[in-house]
Every structure is written in structure tokens, then in C-alpha cells.
Image: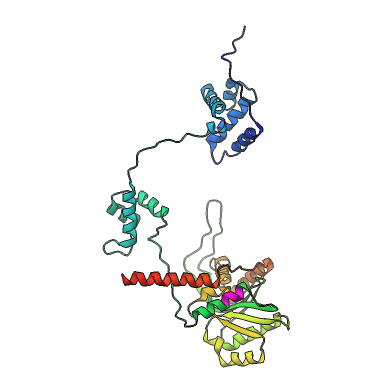
Amino acid sequence: MPKTGRPKKALVLTDDERNALVRLTKRARVNRSLAFRARLVLACAAGTLNSAVARRYRTTNATVGKWRQRFIERRLEGIYDEPRAGAPRTIMDGDVEAVIVKTLETTPPGETHWSTRSMAAQAGMSHTTVGRIWRTFGLKPHLTESFKISPDPQLIEKVRDVVGLYMNPPTNAAVFSFDEKSQIQALERAQPILPMDIGQPERRTHNYMRNGTLDLFAALNVATGEVLARCKSRHRAADFVAFLREIDASVEPLQEVHVVLDNLSAHRAPVVHRWLLRHPRFHLHFTPTYASWLNLVERFFGMLTEKALRRGSHTSVAALRDAILAYVAAHNEKGKPFKWTKTADEILDKMRRFGLRTQQVHAQ
């Protein structure tokens, strides 16, 4: 009579359990061990002997029996790893607090900021531990950002005016965000750019040749996201008036036109005032001094620089103009507007809190 071994308790799956195990088998690239255990349980549930399952998945009978038994006893929870105690902590909460306080309130002798290694030498721990503490609490001593608080006496009124146009534009009116991107350089790399290859990023030389400059006039239609752009050799008041004429021609005759722009002197020249008097449907809204971030077209300029100019190589001003206009055409085909989300009250409150914090720091 053949030996059949010890009788095994039947492994029966519910539909939910089977679906959950099948999903786990598809996570082989995320958690290989968990997917492997799920395959073992599914094979055992199909009535296959442990020895046959072990041969199919190239493991031992003991391994198959272990995960079969654990699933029978604890169901799905049984195939997950149990929590382990691990080694005792060597860095206590007080040590972490000391690193944070020292990072925020002190600097190393003769230096402007801490590095992970200088802090590690001071705190008596490894630089990798210091790095983990800094990442956990969002501390980045190696980074610095610039800021400028606007001294404009009409700051509050201008912020409310401009943000109101973005979030609640007037009816039967077109709102444009206008600015000039001046002195764009046609830079030609000293040697040809090497294209990206498998395992190798695009490469270019650090040095370049200058082939002239041009100015870009751009007006972003806040409602549609389309950009009206013209490249010019200079940005005088007469050039600004000429561009206003193009905006005028692009808008329906019965619509009002509101233009958000900065405080460049060319925007306030007498020739501009005379043109506005002859075109009363145009209304200019000036951003506060040192507040170009309030001009929505600046977001478009940032995308233009990042996606079309910074990595380019332009042999002439004409080539640079073609690259700019090609990007503008591609942008307009998408027709997706930028969405302004911050209200004027939120912006002003954030500026108030920033100003109070700055005063407190310098009062110490």
C-alpha cells in the first residue's frame, strides 16, 4: 500500500481571499517574497501536493508547509512578515532635538552654514544619521532663497486689483497678462550637442558663442491660456504701443480689454497715455513694485526658458526667434489656461506673517 504521509488540513479559499492572493502575485517587482508566498498558497489551494508545489517553484517542502500552515491559521495576515523588535536605539530624542536646535540657531566657526559632516563631528554621530534627521524635519542648510518685500505704498490695492482680475474677471471683457522678456541671448554651443543615448544623458559644452539678442513681447490671455507673442529688437514705448495695437486687433470690438503689466518706464510714457486716450476700452493694471510673481505671464516665460531655450543652441537671432515662436505655437495648440488659486486675502496674510517673522529675527 503506497505511503501518503500525514493527512493535511484542507486549504479552502474564499473568493475575496483568492482575488487578494492573485493581486499579490502581480507585485513581483515591488515585493518578490510576498508574491512568492501568494503563489505557494494558491498552488496548495488547487489541491497540489506540497512536494509538487516545491518542485514547481524550486523551494523546499518545509517552506511550502510553513506558508500553507500559516495561511490556514491566520488567513491573509499569515503570509505577511511579523514585526521585529530590531536593535535598541542609539540616538535618543534628546540627541535629535540637539541637532535640530544647533542647525537652526548656530553656525560652525568661520562658516555660514552646517554640512552633514561638520554637524556629525559636532554632535558625535554619523553624517548619514544627521542627513536622516534633516530630511525628516525638512532642514536644508545647503540651500538658500532670495526674497524682496515690496515697498509699494499701494501694495494692498494693487494685489486685490490684479488677483481680482484673475479670479473674477469682468463680464464681456478680455484680461491679458503682459510682459517683456528682454535681452534673450542667441547662444551657440562651442561644439555640437551630443544627443541622449541609452545610459547616457544629453551632453553639451559649458562654453558658448553669443550671436545677438532679442526682446520678446508676450500677452497671455488669462481665460484661454493662449499667448500673443512678438519678437522685437528693442522694447521702447513705441514698441509697446505697437503691441497694444496687436492686442486691440485680436479682441472683439465690443469687449473691454484689461492688461496686467509691470512698472517699466516705457509703459508710462506720454506716447502710451496718448494712445490710451484714443482707445478708452483699454485699462492698465500695474503690479506692485518688486512683485513680478503677481504677473501670470511670468509662468509662461519660465516654461519657455526651461523647455525651449536653456538647452538649445542657436546660431543666429533668426534661429532663436524661430525656436521661441515654435514653442508659442505649440503652447497655443494645447489651449490650457493657468489657474490662479490664491485669493488676495491669503496672499496678504502670508506677506504679513513673513514680515512679522523677519522683524522678530532682526529684533533678537
Q: Quick one: 100 or 306, which is closer to the camera?
A: 100
Which residue is located at x 54 percent, y 26 percent?
73
| Residue 342 left/right relative to 136 | right
Q: Main secondary structure of the magenta part?
A: helix
To which quarter of the image does residue 179 belong?
A: bottom right
Residue farthest to the left?
109
Number of marks in the rendered image? 0
Q: Is residue 313 visible in this depiction of the protein?
A: no
Residue farthest to the right?
253
Q: Quadrant of the N terminus?
A: top right
Q: Position of residue 219 (x, y in %)?
A: 62, 77
Which residue is located at x 50 percent, y 76 percent?
291
**Residue 234 against residue 148 in the figure, above or below:** below
To which quarter of the image does residue 99 belong?
A: bottom left
Q: Position of residue 324 (x, y in %)?
A: 61, 72
Q: Position of residue 310 (x, y in %)?
A: 53, 67
Q: Magenta segment, which residues? A: 162-166
Q: Quadrant of the C terminus?
A: bottom left
Q: Quick one: 23 or 55, which is closer to the camera?
A: 23
| Residue 11 left/right relative to 60 | right
Q: Position of residue 314 (x, y in %)?
A: 56, 71
What colour scheme was applied to this rendering of the protein?
rainbow
**Residue 339 against residue 235 in the figure, above or below:** above
Q: Quick one: 323 or 243, which is closer to the camera?
A: 243
